[in-house]
Structures are given as structure tokens and as C-alpha cells.
């Protein structure tokens, strides 16, 4: 038992606060960057609807009509929502690149954490 107890590195309150704000900024950047760069959302198309002034013309039954009316919607105000169809197509290359980045991040995370994990396990359970 020549090894001393593992002492994790300490960080000041300012350092913890700064790290928290920095991570929050990174999360916001990661969420808004695709929108800002125009990479999110494939767009939407409009269905051609002949009669947008009645619920029947919009293809809504009595139950659906009641639900729209609970939302204080009329056929004219609900028509753009009902007629909108989103394009869910995606680029397989972009999906593969995203998967590669995520997997690479986890590999990097585990490689950098390997020494700390081994120190903690060695302290708690000894060298086996």
C-alpha cells in the first residue's frame, strides 16, 4: 500500500462558473449553428387545397374541427398549418460525417480519461 489516496484536482468557484458558462455557450452554438448556416430543415411544401374556407374542404372531420376550434382557429387560419408538409430527406454523407464526429469525440473522451479512471479504480479496489 505504498500508493497514497487519489486526490482529484481542485477548481476554484470562478473556474467552475466559467466552465459552466463556457459549456452553455457551446451548447447554444451547437444548436444554433446549423440554423444560422442553413443546414437545418430541408424546407416544406404546400399541399394544393381547392377550398381553404371550410373544414370539409381542408379534409378535417368533426372531431378534428372541434380540436381546431378549441385552439381558436378558423379554417382560414388553420389552412397554412394543415397544408404544410415538411421535407424529411437527409444527406447520407452528412449523417455519416456526424456519426464519425460523435464516435471520435467519445473515443477521445475515453482516451483522455483512461489515466484518471485507472487511478480511481486502483485507489478503491487496489491493484489486482
Image (spheres, grey):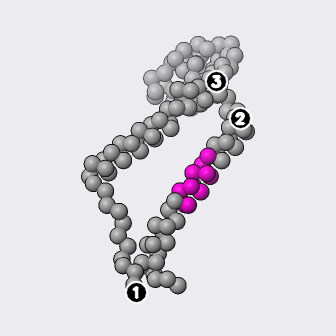
Percent across and percent down for residue 109 are 53, 56
Q: Residue tagged by mark 2?
A: 91
Q: Residue at x 72, y 38 (%)?
A: 93
Q: Tell me where the magenta segment starts and ends, as one range.
A: 101-111
User: In the image, is residue 75 part of the stretch drawn in magenta?
Assistant: no
In this figure, which residue is indicated by the disc labeled 1? 1
Q: Nearer the viewer, mark 2 or mark 3?
A: 2
Secondary structure at numbered mark 2: loop
Q: Residue at x 56, y 61 (%)?
A: 111
Q: Is residue 32 left or right of residue 98?
A: left
Q: Which residue is mark 3?
A: 44
Q: Quadrant of the N terminus?
A: bottom left
Counting residues from the N terminus, which is met first, the one under dot 1 or under dot 3? 1
- Vertical arrangement, residue 5 with respect to residue 45, above or below: below
Closer to the camera: disc 1 or disc 3?
1
Residue sitting at 50 percent across and 36 percent down?
31
Q: Nearer the viewer, residue 35 or 82?
A: 35
Amino acid at each position: 500500500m505504498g500508493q497514497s489516496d487519489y486526490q482529484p484536482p481542485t477548481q476554484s468557484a470562478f473556474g467552475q462558473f466559467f466552465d459552466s458558462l463556457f459549456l452553455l455557450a457551446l451548447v447554444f452554438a451547437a444548436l444554433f449553428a446549423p440554423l444560422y448556416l442553413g443546414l437545418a430543415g430541408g424546407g416544406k411544401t404546400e399541399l394544393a387545397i381547392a377550398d381553404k374556407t371550410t373544414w370539409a374542404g381542408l379534409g378535417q372531420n368533426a372531431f378534428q374541427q372541434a380540436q381546431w376550434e378549441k385552439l381558436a382557429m378558423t379554417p382560414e387560419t388553420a389552412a397554412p398549418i394543415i397544408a404544410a408538409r415538411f421535407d424529411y430527406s437527409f444527406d447520407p454523407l452528412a449523417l455519416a460525417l456526424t456519426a464519425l464526429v460523435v464516435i471520435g469525440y467519445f473515443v477521445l473522451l475515453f482516451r483522455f480519461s483512461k489515466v484518471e479512471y485507472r487511478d480511481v479504480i486502483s485507489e478503491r479496489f487496489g491493484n489486482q
